[in-house]
Image: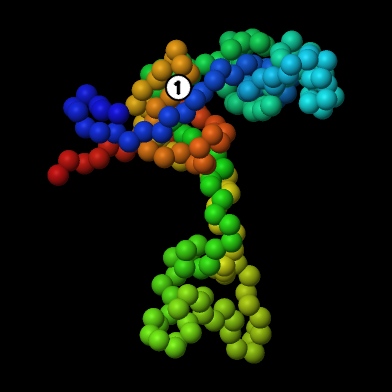
Amino acid sequence: MFDASGAVVACTVIQAEPNIIAQIKTEATDGYEAVQLAFETIQVQDARTIEKRVAKPLLGHFKKAGVAPAKHLLESRVENASQYIVGQTVGVSLFEGCGHIDVSGVSIGKGYQGVMKLHGFSGGPKSHGSGFHRHAGSTGMRSTPGRCLPGGKRASHMGDNNMTVQSLRVVHIDAENNLLFVEGAVPGAKNSLVVMQAAKKARKKKAHK
């Protein structure tokens, strides 16, 4: 996209379909203020088959709230839960006037990787016949303690971790199509699920030289 000055801004487009409030928790009943959001309503051709797609405890939970069963449930802390009602729809317009947001998701899994790609090791000599191009090197020590201490950097699984990218600038909000444009990258692959909330940390202004 282009900002007001004509500069190009690389954005990630997030489709934020409306969430439905399935439960409200208050200080009196639960000890804290929060709302439970239901996302992505389960679509079935025959309404009688919905019981096969949802566990009975969850089905009863949705029936009690009078909300259509959904695939995802998420609890969000709020300052005053009394201003919300069960069944209320929360859309992307909630972020109007919110300059920056924090986006949480599961990072892209990259399988089992070696220490050079996973931890940024420089590797060994590149000369012919060294046989030590991409190794980790020694991980142990002498006869005392006679073992490899835990917690060291090893070849391991890379990615597929829960992570949060903080203070992403909200560039544009398309409430009609439920789209949110944020500057920069968000965790996860395309079509993956992310959680958005107002930024907890104030973004530092860049100093002009």
Q: Residue at x 62, y 16 (%)?
A: 20
User: Element under label 1?
Assistant: strand
Locate residue 192 relative to residue 203 in the image: left or right. right
Q: Residue at x 21, y 32 (%)?
A: 7
Vertical arrangement, residue 44 with respect to residue 87, above or below: below
Q: Could you say where residue 3 lies in the image, as x and y percent from the top left?
A: 25, 27
Q: Nearer the viewer, residue 115 or 84?
A: 115
Q: Residue at x 79, y 25 (%)?
A: 54
Quarter of image, res 36: top right
Vertical arrangement, residue 154 with respect to residue 64, above or below: below
Quarter of image, res 110: bottom right
Q: Is residue 58 visible?
A: yes
Q: Nearer the viewer, residue 171 or 98?
A: 171
Locate residue 154 relative to residue 55 in the image: left or right. left
Q: Which residue is mark 1?
A: 179
Locate residue 2 relative to residue 21 in the image: left or right. left
